[in-house]
Image: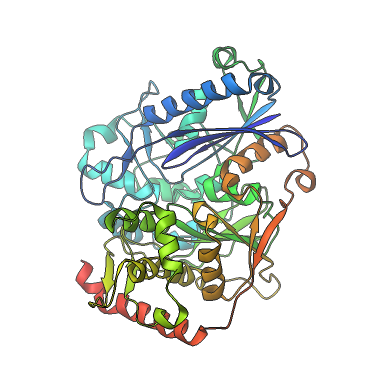
Amino acid sequence: MYLGLDLGTSELKALLLADDHRIVGVARAPLTVDRPQPLWSEQAPQQWWQALEEVMAQLKASHGEALKAVRAIGLSGQMHGATLLDEAGEVLRPAILWNDGRSGPQCEALARAVPRLGEIAGNLAMPGFTAPKLLWVREHEPEVFSRVARVLLPKDWLRFMLSGEAVSEMSDAAGTLWLDVGARDWSDELLAATGLTRAHMPRLVEGSEVSARLKLELAVRWGLRDDVKIAGGAGDNAASAVGMGLVEPGQGFVSLGTSGVVFVSTDRFLPNPAQAMHAFCHALPKRWHQMSVMLSAASAVSWAAKTFKFADEAALLEAAASVSPAQRERCPLFLPYLSGERSPHNNPNAQGVLFGLTHAHGPAEIAYAVVEGVSFGLRDGFDTLRLPADMPLREMALVGGGARSVWWGQLLADIFGVTLTLYAGSETGGALGAARLAWLADGGEVAKVCTLPPVKQQLMPSTEGADVRRTRHARFQALYKSLRDQFQ
């Protein structure tokens, strides 16, 4: 039995996985985000620990016997968050999250200080990454910065609390801008540019390796055995890929979560920082991945559902689906940049726009515009991927909460022009991937552990309405370009 813990932005999820691939139990605890100022996004790490205590209590009550059989724990989580600890291991300030946009000026300073940044880190300097956050703290909270003894990513802080060990792994570390992604090691040059050294960094392991052991007092409290291993784990998207069995070159997924992600596994380091495409380490040795990220995907749908008084997101999607293909051409256009944007614009100042409203437009047309705008944003990210000729795109799964809408999935397949596969259990991707990495750390073989789940449905792209989609996508792109300077 294996336990996967997935520390998301809106919830912490725990999943029990048997060694015959059965999901034995799942528990969840909600999380909230603090936004004390514009562009800021923070969480108190203590909230993460309280959520972990809650899910473990749930599992102990509902699956106590299964917990006793757990041999290893895997960790997955939101990437890039800066969790700052002092010499005693105490948290110095709320963690600055992945979707925090305050460090735009620091990104510019970092890019000037290290012209080779993209070559080493495989990515542009963006406010979402960890390194610019530390430059912001050094400039605006110098007393805090002077006391920083250790910087941990969110899931790695959980590991620290679980084991007392400061350890990270390659996929999450690749999202800090401190990792030499090709060499899979910390870069002294990048660390020095932010006033840090290797002493501030956790030890590195591969995601499928043993990183630490669970503290005995926690094992006793939660009803686990006294020799539980903790795997390296993975950042949320790499963990989702492992959970879906998408670990071979050319396999990938589109994720409709809080953020939107297009992810493809590779067998080599293939950066394309010029278009804000991310090149990261995968969770398995000698594997990397390319990834485009938009900051508001399903979260834009949630915003619209609340703002325009739909009962919930499902009601908004139902209304959007009611707009006929003939009506779509006359719908408004929506720029989904409610939290700025990463791929392909790298613009923390980008904003949401609903353009072209008339008296003829009602809630359904607005709903369609929002879903279409998110889909166009994902397509723009998809177009930044650069796969070599000997690595064709083999598999695109559709995952995340938004994947529950088959209508939205079909719209995405049409806009992307590729087949999207819905797999059973795709909503458990990150936690399932974490549990699978625990299994690998306990001696499991990749071919047996990282299998593809059963196929629920395949969504084939349709050519019907293709001319309208192309025209509206071109207008969508032109609208951003025309407004870009107005967002400053």
Quarter the N terminus occupies: top right
**Direction from residue 104 to residue 292 in the image, left or right:** right
Q: Position of residue 259 (x, y in %)?
A: 43, 55
Residues 343 and 297: in front is 297
Q: How is the image coloured?
A: rainbow
For this orientation, the residue located farthest to the bottom is 467
**Direction from residue 4 to residue 114 in the image, left or right:** left
Quarter the C terminus occupies: bottom left
Q: Residue at x 78, y 42 (%)?
A: 445
Q: Residue at x 29, y 74 (%)?
A: 361
**Direction from residue 187 to residue 334 in the image, left or right:** left
Q: Position of residue 403 (x, y in %)?
A: 54, 57
Q: Position of residue 62 (x, y in %)?
A: 60, 23
Question: For residue 481, which quarter of the picture?
Answer: bottom left
From this view, report whether residue 26 is shown above or below residue 478: above
Would you say residue 101 is visible in this rendering? Answer: yes
From this view, report whether residue 60 is shown above or below residue 184: above
From this view, report whether residue 105 is shown above or below residue 410: above
Q: Residue at x 38, y 40 (%)?
A: 82
From this view, report whether residue 77 is shown above or below residue 226: below
Q: How many marks?
A: 0
**Direction from residue 125 to residue 350 in the image, left or right:** left
Q: Position of residue 418 (x, y in %)?
A: 61, 73
Residues 365 and 211: in front is 365
Would you say residue 295 is visible in this rendering? Answer: no
